[in-house]
Image: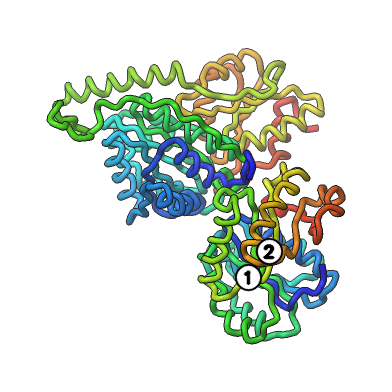
């Protein structure tokens, strides 16, 4: 009926994945991401794709491993406790150089926590997500449109670098409804000569494994992988700058926190306070350069987070501790209000008015 | 819009806007009916609930029947014991907010024999042509049939709630009239009302019959 349709963030992920050529989805229900699975359950049978509700998150991630080995695009999704269950599989995917998209619509933790939005899985997503030396590309959407766009981008990056990619959203992003446009022209296809697609008696067997018992061989592999990570760090950093040109105070925020921060910045600008925003879109690779630059320009950086302060460590490293980096946060499923952020801005500007 | 039956059941596709319509319809009907109650029988999504509007209900003297566990630590798919009043207390005028799709409509089943025997109800399908899985009459009617099969009641009318959220323009609403008409024609059901954001009401009130102005009920983010 129209170019723009009204979608929940979770639905946008699912439809964008299908548009990106993902015909295999394995998952297990958990609030607040269940709509991804529910949507896939309705759509996949109609287009000849595979939707399978696994018996657990552990099973689902290993099904992802299986399909990824054949070179097909594949996705799973969950929320925080479910991602913890998948962490073994994430490590195996990385250790086998397999591309896949893993969606985490975060909820409050630790433990079972709650069902309300959170960003407290930042460490888990960006500092590993499982055992061993490895990285995942981590994408942080801040609107329903970006939920869709970054899903498509996530598949492309995963294929390009042969590594698991995570879409790190939160409960608000998953549940909120906004108009979206899903006009994608999917053109990029990556050749996958390593995939286990049958030799047809024409080539050697392809072997997908993460088991390497000879330590020197494993060391070489890990070092080679980290060379690839360097290329990702050089080429794939994404971020948004908002009113940073003349900013004297910088806010660092991603996802829903960045939306709240923008409201607060608009209000502060009305009061004449020069404040801007750096919004990381890739959490790994982290946008080091803009924060390094900001540290020579602003007098304080405020990290606004739905956690006890996790990204703040990367902000401090990137800004090389040249200026104070302070935290403005809520956690456990609570969201900082624009007023709370405005108060932090006022404080940074030399005291509350 | 007058002559509402004693029970107005709102069903529809997941995310079609049932709760928003229920809340706004309650505000509208409170002017006509004293004993107005809203019943939240949504067992599908605990994220958006009629109970989120409890303050507005209290201010207007509208009673809310909902699971006593709603918005608490044990927010499991539960139905309120109070829901039996909907069929036993014939003095009530009720708007019943049912969960999305066939899964949500199963919750109605327990009340259906009484609703049928009293036969003083309307079951309205809330439709939004801007939702990805109900973009045309055919897909919308498929959801309609699934809901009817699940709850054992037949729809009696439609609510055209086609919108794209806060960005909705008058043109978006006008463009949806054709869609709603096709659903109406294919199902044989009347369009009982069309809903619009309150700020579009004046622009559209002379162009569309039975227009209900709506205030979006949203989570305070």
Is residue B199 or residue A237 the one in the foreground?
Answer: B199
Along the horizontal axis of the image, is B175 left or right of A102? right
Which class describes the residues within 10 Å of circle 1: few (<14), some (14-19), or many (20+)? some
Residue A65 percent across, percent down from the top left: 29, 40
Coordinates of residue A258 in the picture (x, y in percent)? 62, 34
Q: Nearer the viewer, residue A300 or B179?
A: B179
Q: Is residue A113 visible?
A: no
Pick the front one: B126 or A130: B126
**Which of the 4 quarters of the picture holds residue B27?**
bottom right
Image quarter hosting the N terminus of chain B: bottom right
**Is residue B11 visible in the rendered structure shown here?**
yes
Which quadrant holds the C terminus of chain B? top right
Local SS, label 1: loop
Q: Is residue A67 above or below residue A297?
A: below
Using the rendered view, name the quadrant where residue A349 is placed. top right
Instruction: For mark 2, name the chain.
Output: B
Task: Using the image, determine if residue A320 lies above or below residue B82.
Answer: above
The residues tagged by marks 2 and 1 sit, at their Cα atoms, a distance apart of: 8 Å
- Residue A315 location in percent, x, y? 54, 25
Mark 2 — residue? B158
Of residue B15 and residue B189, the one placed in the foreground of this image is B189
Asked which secondary structure carries label 2, the reply is strand
Checking the image for residue B155, the label placed there is 1
Q: Chain of mark 1?
A: B
The residue sitting at 36% across, 48% down in the picture is A50
Q: Are marks 2 and 1 in contact (CB under 8 Å)?
A: yes
**Mark linked to residue B70:** none
Q: Residue at x 46, y 42 (%)?
A: A104
């Amino acid at each position: 009926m129209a170019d723009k349709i009204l979608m929940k963030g979770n639905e946008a992920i699912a439809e964008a994945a299908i548009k990106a050529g993902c015909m295999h989805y394995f998952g297990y229900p958990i609030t607040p991401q269940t709509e991804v699975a529910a949507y896939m359950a309705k759509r996949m049978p109609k287009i000849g794709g595979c939707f399978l509700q696994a018996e657990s998150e552990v099973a689902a991630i290993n099904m992802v491993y299986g399909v990824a080995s054949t070179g097909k695009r594949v996705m799973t999704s969950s929320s925080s406790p479910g991602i913890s269950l998948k962490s073994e599989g994430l490590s195996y995917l990385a250790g086998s150089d397999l591309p896949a998209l893993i969606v985490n619509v975060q909820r409050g933790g630790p433990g079972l926590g709650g069902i309300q939005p959170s960003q407290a899985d930042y460490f888990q997503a960006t500092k590993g997500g499982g055992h061993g030396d490895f990285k995942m590309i981590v994408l942080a959407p801040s609107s329903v449109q970006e939920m869709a766009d970054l899903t498509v981008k996530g598949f492309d990056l995963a294929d390009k670098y042969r590594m698991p990619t995570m879409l790190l959203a939160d409960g608000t992003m998953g549940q909120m409804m906004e108009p979206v446009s899903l006009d994608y022209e999917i053109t990029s296809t990556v050749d996958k000569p390593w995939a286990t697609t049958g030799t047809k008696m024409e080539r050697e067997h392809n072997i997908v494994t993460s088991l390497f018992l000879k330590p020197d061989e494993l060391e070489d592999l890990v070092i080679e992988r980290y060379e690839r990570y360097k290329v990702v760090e050089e080429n794939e950093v994404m971020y948004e700058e908002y009113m940073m040109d003349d900013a004297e105070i910088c806010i660092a925020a991603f996802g829903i926190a960045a939306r709240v921060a923008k409201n607060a910045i608009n209000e502060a600008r009305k009061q004449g306070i020069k404040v801007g925003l750096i919004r990381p879109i890739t959490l790994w690779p982290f946008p080091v350069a803009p924060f390094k630059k900001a540290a020579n320009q602003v007098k304080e950086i405020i990290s606004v987070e739905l956690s006890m302060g996790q990204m703040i460590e990367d902000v401090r490293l990137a800004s090389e501790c040249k200026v104070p980096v302070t935290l403005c946060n809520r956690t456990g499923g609570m969201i900082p209000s624009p007023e709370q952020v405005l108060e932090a801005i006022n404080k940074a500007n030399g005291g509350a008015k | 819009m007058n002559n509402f039956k004693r029970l107005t059941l709102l069903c529809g596709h997941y995310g079609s806007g049932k709760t928003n319509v229920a809340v706004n319809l309650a505000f509208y009907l409170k002017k006509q009916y004293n004993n107005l109650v809203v019943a939240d029988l949504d067992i599908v999504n605990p994220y958006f609930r009629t109970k989120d509007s409890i303050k507005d209900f209290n201010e207007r003297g509208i009673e809310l029947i909902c699971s006593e566990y709603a918005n608490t630590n044990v927010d499991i798919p539960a139905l309120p014991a109070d829901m039996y009043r909907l069929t036993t207390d014939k003095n009530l005028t009720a708007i019943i907010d049912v969960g999305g799709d066939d899964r949500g409509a199963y919750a109605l089943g327990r009340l259906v024999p009484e609703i049928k025997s009293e036969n003083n109800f309307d079951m309205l399908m809330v439709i939004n042509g801007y939702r990805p899985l109900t973009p045309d009459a055919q897909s919308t009617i498929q959801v309609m049939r699934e809901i009817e099969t699940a709850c054992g009641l037949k729809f009696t009318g439609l609510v055209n709630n086609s919108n794209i959220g806060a960005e909705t323009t008058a043109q978006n609403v006008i463009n949806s009239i054709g869609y709603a008409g096709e659903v109406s024609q294919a199902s044989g059901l009347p369009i009982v009302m069309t809903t619009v954001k309150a700020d579009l009401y004046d622009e559209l009130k002379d162009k569309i019959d039975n227009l209900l102005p709506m205030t979006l009920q949203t989570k305070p983010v």
